[in-house]
Each structure stands twice: as C-alpha cells, then as structure tokens.
Amino acid sequence: MSNMEVEETNINNNSKHDETESLNISNDSLQSEDSTDLKYFNGVEISQLTKRQMKKYKKFLNWENVKKIKRAQERKKCKEKKIHAKLNNIEIGPSRKELNKNKMENSSCKVGICIDLSFSDLMINKDMAKTIKQILRVYTENRRAKAPMQLHLTSFNGKSKEEMARHNGYENWDINIHEKDYLDIFPKEKLVYLSSESDNVIQNFDDDKIYIIGGLVDHNFHKGICLKKANEQGIAHAQLPISEYFWMKTRKVLTINQVFEIILRITEGKNWKEAFEMILPKRKEKRDIEKDELTEITEIKE
Ligand SMILES: C[S@@+](CC[C@H](N)C(=O)[O-])C[C@H]1O[C@@H](n2cnc3c(N)ncnc32)[C@H](O)[C@@H]1O
C-alpha cells in the first residue's frame, strides 16, 4: 500500500470513528442543560422559571447544542473533502479567504454585465424560479473567477425580488442590485443588448461597455423580444458568433448563465471556439458542413 493510500484509509477510519463520536455527543448534549452560561431566559431568571418556561428553556438548549454539533460536523466534512481533494489532485476551487479578496471592485476586468429583470410579468412562477436559479449560477461563476466581471441586476423588483428572497443573504452578495431600469443607471451609448436575433455579431468585449442579458426564461415563446426592446430604446445590440464556430441543429438561443459564462471565458483570454466548447453541451459526432468541421450543438435546455 502506498503512503497516499495509507493516509487515505486513515482518514476514512478516523472519520467513521469521529462520526460515531459526534453521534454520542449529540445524544449526550440532548440531555445536557447546563452547557451555556445563561442566567436569564426570555427575561426571567433561570431559577425562577415556571415548569412550562423550563420546558421551553430545555428545548432551546437542546436546539443550541444540536446547531453546534451540526456546524462541527459540517466543518469536519469540509476538512475531509479538502484532504481527499489534495490527496487525489482534485481542484476544489478558491478558498473562502481567496474569495473574500476577489471582489468585483478589485477585479482587473471592467467589462459590465447587466441582467435585465424587467420581464418578470411575462413569466409563470416556475420560469421565474428558473431565471433566478440561472442568476445564482451566474453569481457563483463570477465569484469564483480570478477576475470577476462587473455584474448588475436591474429592474429587480416585484416577482424577481420575491423569488430571490428565498435565497438567504443575497443582499450581502458581491453584485450590484438595482430596482431601477438600466436606462436610469447607465448612459445609453454604453449599452449593448445581447440577442440571438440581432444581425450584428460581437467579436470582443469592451471594458467601457455594459452588455445586457435578458433575464428571461420563456422557451423562446417571446421570440425576439429583447431585440425589439433594444430597437425601440435606440440602443446597440449584438449576438454571440455561435454560427461561425458551430452548427446548431435547432436554435441558437442560449440560457442566461451560458451567455454569461461564455463571455467570462472570453474575458479570461479563451478564444470563441474554446469558450463555446467549454460551456455548451455538444454531441460526440462532428459534422462536415461546407467543408468546415463544425461541432454540432444539441438543443439548449433552459
Ligand atoms: C433564454 S434567452 C431569452 C430569449 C428571448 N426569447 C429573447 O428573445 O431574448 C436569455 C437571454 O440570453 C441572451 N442570449 C441568448 N442567446 C444568445 C445569443 N446567441 N447571442 C446573444 N445573446 C443571447 C439574450 O440576452 C437573451 O435575452
């Protein structure tokens, strides 16, 4: 057995031992009442509690202990995961400490991305929830990036705000959240609305611009709605150059997080082909189209 294997077996054995130990602790702690230094409970001195209040107090102590144990178990699990990753050369991403340093304001990337949430009323609740889920993915990717992009949510109110409220603490995230529309925040000439229906094809991203992604999951029921909006508002628009690199069997409408992640990869120095290949699901077979080898992309699932 190699050193590495020995070390790993030890970890596993230890973790089993610790697990039973923590289960014992858990049972013990459920019976203990004097694990905190509280003198008062709900404003009443402990020694003066009625039978009923004492029952509540014990319940409270139990819950506090359970919480402590759960936290300790989570910490242990996390530690084990890190050790396992290290032993197996698995990349687990940046640490919390690194993430905390990695704020948008310190980022070398100044490309602005705005997710336009003004379409909430066009979506049924299920699709609104999917939209927010995609935005959570966007947020996670941006947080993990070495050079995060400058991320904004606009028209964040009503349904989108209600749905986001299910995710605790989003108010403290490193993301610019605006209730107002993008037109009330950014100069018009800096805006570029991204739309698969646009005739303009974007090739690179400018630090000085804000690229808008429609915050909409509609299974393309409202085909071209973002392009229409951009034209009505007199702002620039463009599509990603998918067809230059891939042959798409069906449509080339991507999800919010796919668009975001592709742009992020481009800002990190990948070329378009690499960025598309990293983000878009593709079929194994390649098709020869007009003598160019273009990878076929399966239909994008929202
Ligand atoms: C699921 S799509 C919404 C589709 C919607 N029916 C529309 O017409 O915009 C979400 C957003 O991703 C962006 N997007 C999707 N595919 C794109 C592409 N091929 N090029 C540029 N932007 C794209 C657009 O901003 C779009 O509003």
Image (spheres, grey):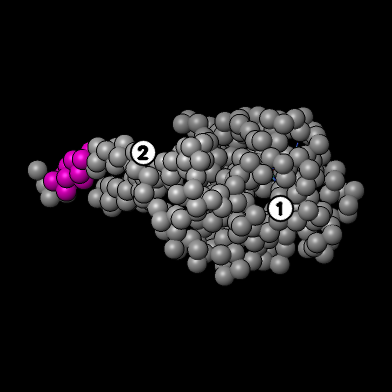
Distance from disc 1 to disc 2, alpha carbons, whole Å, reads 45 Å
> Quick check: 244 left or right of 212?
left
Which one is earlier in the sequence, the residue at label 1 or at label 2? 2
Q: Residue at x 63, y 41 (%)?
A: 166
Circle 2: residue type: Leu
> Quick check: 14 left or right of 103?
left
Circle 1: residue type: Leu
Q: Mark 2 sits on what residue?
A: 30
Residue 256 lies in the magenta stretch: no
Q: Residue at x 75, y 56 (%)?
A: 178
Residue 16 lies in the magenta stretch: yes
Q: Mark 1 sits on what residue?
A: 153
**Which quadrant: the C terminus?**
top right
Single out the residue that lies furthest toward the right. Answer: 232
The reply to whether residue 222 is in sight is yes
> Quick check: 101 left or right of 151?
left
